[in-house]
Image (cartoon, helix red, strand yellow):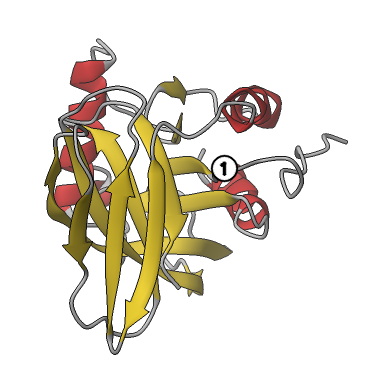
């Protein structure tokens, strides 16, 4: 039995684990289940991005969005990958695992858990909004500052397609994603989230155009 690395001690910033998945993909359920397990770890930001390019094979993913497919395509360009596929794990925006094998993903998580964050990130609640402060970047940017909202857990009955008859659990399903702005990394900067609705939110600070994620944290 594979033991998922316990990152609750000795780490100063969460590791971001992104899974690109689809409810129409027969090889995705084990990866989806692994993300459910990773989402329970305090120092992992596990994000489930549901893509739409398998919708035609019999079951339309109810969580999919074309923008999430575009994010995966952007990663493919940066990583010089010739195609996109599911399931695909990407850790800290820097390395991918197309096999989805737990041991491979766990090794990547452990690798990035040992790295110090590339900047200081602080989050302070201001009424219904949050103030995001960034400073002390290890390297100059520019960085894209993303706000990602997720639904913590949903269970879906699949009635058609390759996964017909299955009842599948999904964790930290991305529902919205937008930019709070761009940071040059040279001087302290503040960003505001604006009033936030239901769900959970994370801030990702990432080298521009889908580069490495240098620091991230949950907003709430």
Residue 61 coordinates in the image, percent (x, y): 31, 60
Residue 22 coordinates in the image, percent (x, y): 37, 49
Position of 9 compared to 170: left or right?
right
Q: Which residue, given by chain and number where applicable, does mark 1 sit on? A: 31
For the question of whether residue 52 can be seen, the reply is no
Residue 55 coordinates in the image, percent (x, y): 24, 51
Specify the quadrant of the image occupied by residue 13.
top right
Q: Residue at x 34, y 55 (%)?
A: 203
Name, please, the residue furthest toward the bottom.
Answer: 127
Specify the quadrant of the image occupied by residue 4.
top right
Q: How many marks?
A: 1
Is residue 160 placed above or below 127 in the rendered structure?
A: above
Screen quadrant of the C terminus: bottom left
- Assign a secondary structure to mark 1: helix
Q: As rendered, which of 124 and 177 lies closer to the eye?
A: 124
Crowd class of label 1 (few under 14; some 14 to 19; many from 20; radius 10 Å): many
Q: Residue at x 21, y 70 (%)?
A: 193
Q: Residue at x 41, y 67 (%)?
A: 219
């Amino acid at each position: 039995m594979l033991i998922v690395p316990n990152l609750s001690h000795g780490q100063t910033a969460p590791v971001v684990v992104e899974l690109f998945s689809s409810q129409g993909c027969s090889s995705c359920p084990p990866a989806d289940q692994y993300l459910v397990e990773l989402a329970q770890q305090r120092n992992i930001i596990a994000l489930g991005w549901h893509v739409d390019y398998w919708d035609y094979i019999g079951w339309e993913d109810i969580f999919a969005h074309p923008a999430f497919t575009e994010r995966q395509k952007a990663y493919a360009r940066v990583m010089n990958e010739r195609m996109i596929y599911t399931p695909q794990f990407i850790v800290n925006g820097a390395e991918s695992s197309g096999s989805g094998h737990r041991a491979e993903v766990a090794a990547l998580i452990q690798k990035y858990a040992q790295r110090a964050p590339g900047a200081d990130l602080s989050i302070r609640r201001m009424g219904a909004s949050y103030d995001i402060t960034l400073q002390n970047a290890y390297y100059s940017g520019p960085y894209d500052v993303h706000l990602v909202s997720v639904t913590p857990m949903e269970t879906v009955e699949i009635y058609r397609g390759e996964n017909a008859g299955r009842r599948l659990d999904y964790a930290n399903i991305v529902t919205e994603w937008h930019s709070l702005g761009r940071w040059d990394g040279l001087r302290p900067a503040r960003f505001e989230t604006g009033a936030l609705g239901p769900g959970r939110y994370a801030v990702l600070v990432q080298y521009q155009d889908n580069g490495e994620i240098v620091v991230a944290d949950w907003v709430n």
